[in-house]
Image: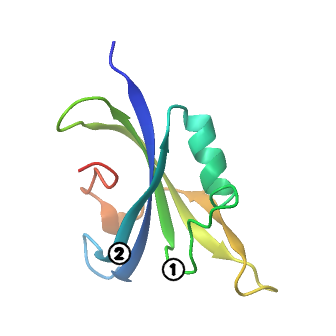
């Protein structure tokens, strides 16, 4: 039976007018063995470890099976939503995969 992990990758975009978008920076923030824990970590902005860092507007959780050249089985996307009253505060909210990433996969392990 293949093992599964859930990677969390944060992405900063330079230009989203092109497809695929011009990525300014990308980093894997962590991984979990359950989707529930991975999602909770993104929604809470890293459970005390700031994965947004006032820079990474997008986050993606990818379900990956073990192996070399692993294929992404599923992905969940999030975008940072700033707090209107506190400019340095906010949280990630769930979204559909942005159109400017259509055809791009394997952000965490690629």
How many labels were placed on the picture? 2
Do tag 1 and tag 2 residues touch (Cβ < 8 Å)? yes
Find the residue positioned furthest to the right: 85
- Image position, residue 96 (x, y; %): 49, 56
Q: CA distance from mark 1 to mark 2?
A: 9 Å
Tell me what residue is drawn at x 35 percent, y 79 percent. 16
Left or right of residue 46, residue 2 in this image = left
Tell me what residue is drawn at x 32 percent, y 63 percent. 101
- Image position, residue 109 (x, y; %): 29, 48
Of the numbered discs in the image, which one, if any, rests on residue 80? none
Left or right of residue 84, residue 61 in this image = left
Left or right of residue 79, residue 44 in this image = right
Of the numbered discs in the image, which one, if any, rests on residue 25? 2
Question: Label 1's element?
Answer: loop
Of the numbered discs in the image, which one, if any, rests on residue 55? 1
* Image quarter of residue 11: bottom left
Which mark is first along the chain, 2 or 1? 2
- Does residue 110 sit above or below 79 in this rendering? above
Residue closest to the eye, 91 or 45: 45
């Amino acid at each position: 039976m293949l093992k599964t992990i859930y990677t969390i990758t944060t992405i900063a975009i330079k230009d989203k007018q092109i497809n695929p978008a011009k990525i300014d920076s990308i980093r894997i923030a962590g991984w979990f063995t359950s989707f529930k824990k991975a999602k909770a970590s993104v929604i809470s902005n890293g459970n005390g470890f700031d994965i947004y860092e006032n820079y990474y507007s997008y986050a993606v959780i990818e379900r990956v099976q073990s192996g070399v050249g692993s294929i992404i089985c599923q992905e969940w996307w999030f975008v940072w939503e700033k707090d209107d009253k506190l400019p340095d505060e906010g949280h990630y909210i769930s979204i559909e995969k942005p159109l400017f990433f259509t055809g791009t996969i394997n952000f965490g392990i690629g």
